[in-house]
Image (cartoon, helix red, strand yellow):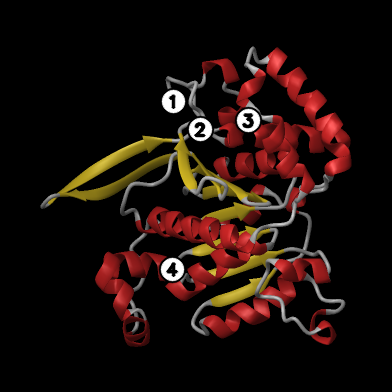
Amino acid sequence: MEGNGEELTAQETALYDRQIRVWGADAQRRLSKAHVLVYGIKGTIAEFCKNIVLAGVGSLTLIDDRIASEEALSSNFLIPPDENVYAGKTLAQLCCDSLKDFNPMVRVSVHKGDLSSFDVEFFYSFDVVIVSSCSLPAKKLVNEKCRKISSKRVAFYTVDCRDSCGEIFVDLQDYKYSKKKLEETIECHLQYPSFEEALSVPWKELPRKTSKLYFAMRVIEKFEEAEGRSAGEVSVADLPGVLKLKRELCAAQSLNESHVPDTLLERLVTSTLEFPPVCAIIGGILGQEVIKAISGKGDPLKNFFFFDAFDGKGIIENISNSNA
């Protein structure tokens, strides 16, 4: 993302002509040399992958060893609907085959393995790492490994979509970028906290208008971790336990329980399947943010984004220590 790299080929210039007119040849060149890793391919990630492949990223590596099921078809349009085609294949394999058809100029590949088992050197190969459908400890661990790479900056994102709600977390570390203000180009600088640092901010120190989704997502993450569940492995039968944990966390964090409505938690545990229109919105925003991070142009999101289809609002929250 930082280097000069090679110039665009004539074929690339012709194929990406329209978007070059929007964000410039330099941004497109950076994008065409960038390497993106995604882990956990549900509906929102499928939307993101489609967007980033069509935009012309250099390479996209997919990791998801789960075997495709009929349930996955509900939100992941990259999976062929024919059971004879998807039966016995992993989500990564199926999505890889579909994405190659979207843009043959992008190198799409599959890597197998457990996310937590990869060392720091593995993540050095990428400019952007995006994780979904994984546990709270795994998110923290991968973010930490990305930050240990001192010779380059690896942008890190988490994305989670449950029912009609979605969340994106962004860590661009020490990030410099440019933006246009009238006829002038302004150089900007942002310092991002890690995922663990952001979550360590006491709830009572956050603004009163902080999104209720932020607190609700943290309660469910903590519940899944405490119960040894995989991400999204909750149901309405878990609601009493989730509500009990909410009360405990609110008491420990000195937060009024009204900031984490029971009705919101009920929605999130009753239907853990993704709502396709929300996948499209969250996946589209994630794609825009990754392109901005790679190109170094435009104001990036700092550092959480929340969307709830019930009110149609997208909210950006800066969850970080005051001195960050």
SS of the residue under disc 1: loop
Q: Earlier in the sequence, mark 4 or mark 1?
A: 4
* Quarter where residue 4 is shown: bottom left
Badge 4: residue crowd in 10 Å (few <14, some 14–19, many ≥20): many
In whole angstroms, how far apart are the C-alphas of marks 3 and 4? 37 Å
Tell me the tag on residue 215. 3
Where in the figure is residue 65, as x and y percent of width and height?
Answer: 79, 64
Badge 1: residue crowd in 10 Å (few <14, some 14–19, many ≥20): few
Q: Do the residues labelled 2 and 1 touch (CB within 8 Å)?
A: yes
Where in the figure is residue 108, as x and y percent of width and height?
Answer: 60, 75
Where in the figure is residue 58, as x and y percent of width and height?
Answer: 48, 71
Residue hosting label 1:
324
The reply to whether residue 158 is visible in this rendering is yes
Badge 3: residue crowd in 10 Å (few <14, some 14–19, many ≥20): many
Q: Which of marks 4 and 2 is nearer the N terminus?
A: 4
Q: Which of marks 3 and 1 is in front?
A: 3
In whole angstroms, how far apart are the C-alphas of marks 2 and 3? 18 Å
Q: Which amino acid does label 1 sit on?
A: Ala
In whole angstroms, how far apart are the C-alphas of marks 4 and 2? 26 Å
Q: Do the residues labelled 4 and 2 touch (CB within 8 Å)?
A: no
Residue hosting label 2:
193
Q: Which amino acid does label 3 sit on?
A: Phe
SS of the residue under disc 4: loop
Q: In which quarter of the image is the N terminus?
A: bottom left
Residue hosting label 4:
33
Q: Quadrant of the C terminus?
A: top left
Q: Earlier in the sequence, mark 2 or mark 3?
A: 2
Q: Which residue is drawn at 59% across and 20% down?
A: 203
Residue 86 drawn above or below residue 123? below
Badge 2: residue crowd in 10 Å (few <14, some 14–19, many ≥20): many
In whole angstroms, how far apart are the C-alphas of marks 4 and 1? 31 Å
